[in-house]
Amino acid sequence: MRQLIIILVTATILLGWGKTGHRVIGKIAEENLTPEAQAKITELFGHSDLARIGNWADEIKSDPKWDHSHDWHYCTIIEGQDYAGPETGGRAVQKVTEFSNLLRKGTLGEKDQKDVLRFIVHIVGDLHQPLHVGNGTDRGGNDVKVTWFREETNLHRVWDSQMVDHMQYSYTEFAQQIQLGMSDEDKAALLDPTLLSFVNASRATHPQVYDIDDGKLSWPYIYKNRELMEDRLLNGGFHLAAILNDIYK
Ligand code: ADE
Ligand code: ZN
Ligand code: ZN
């Protein structure tokens, strides 16, 4: 029984954005790929549907063969400091850099190219979930117990999935809704990121994300954070496209 509880607890603390969040980011990214990137991804997968590719890195957590990948989904920036590498906790930044370089080099076989690309799509998405850039004290908010409409949960899970799911959009509706009214200039501005700039942007949201009063979260928390959540998903989509476009240019 104790083992079962440990397994269940571990399973709930390690996921990134939930399925819908990763699909939204994948969908937006796909719509903004260059023809070259789209062709290369289609060559590998038979399609370039990044919404379909984006959740694999969470699914393989059920395969012990991939146990070593569990800390590739997040990173840590200690309060008041700059990002200081994987030693502070989590290898997400290191892995996106390493995997992008591997794809650029062009020496991987087809299976490895596919796995590496699936990881990039997923991890870049995760790094836009504010609590996947942790502060090093509470496992990205997993230790911050809160209630969500009276259900016991934690702050990390609220951001991974509960707030996204609360919107009751399909991922395609979500992707469409949050891009409404964007001009070409708006889009171009989002297509020029650096990895550390968006990691820092996620971290910079923490004062707002952690503003939880008594921890009983419901409508007022959504009211305050909906725009931020949508902004992070939107940025995730464009930044992912930018990274893939740069790899396959
Ligand atoms: N474990 C430790 N830090 C974490 C984070 N920021 N996100 C997910 N899991 C974690
Ligand atoms: Zn998560
Ligand atoms: Zn993840």
Image (cartoon, rainbow, N blue to C red):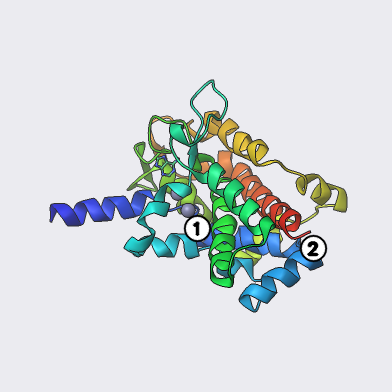
Which of the two residues, 37 or 233, is positioned nearer the viewer here?
A: 37
Q: What element carries label 2?
A: loop
Tell me the number on the disc at residue 231: none
Element type at mark 1: helix
Q: Distance between the residues labelled 1 and 2?
A: 30 Å
The picture places residue 100, in percent across and down from the top left corner, at 64, 53
Quadrant of the snapshot with the C terminus: bottom right
Front in this rendered view, residue 38 or 111: 111
Q: Name the residue under label 1.
A: 165
Q: Tell me the quarter of the picture where residue 62 sits.
A: bottom left
**Quadrant where the N terminus is found in the figure:** bottom left
- Label count reads 2
Confirm whether residue 107 shows in the render. yes
Please name the residue shown 74% across and 60% down the image: 248
Which dot, 1 or 2, sits closer to the camera? 2
Earlier in the chain: of badge 1 and badge 2, it is 2
Q: Position of residue 26 (x, y in %)?
A: 63, 62
Q: Find disc 2 in the rendering and name its residue.
A: 34
Circle 2 crowding by C-alpha within 10 Å: few under 14, some 14–19, many from 20: some
Residue 170 visible: no
- Decide which of 106, 81 is in the foreground and name it: 106
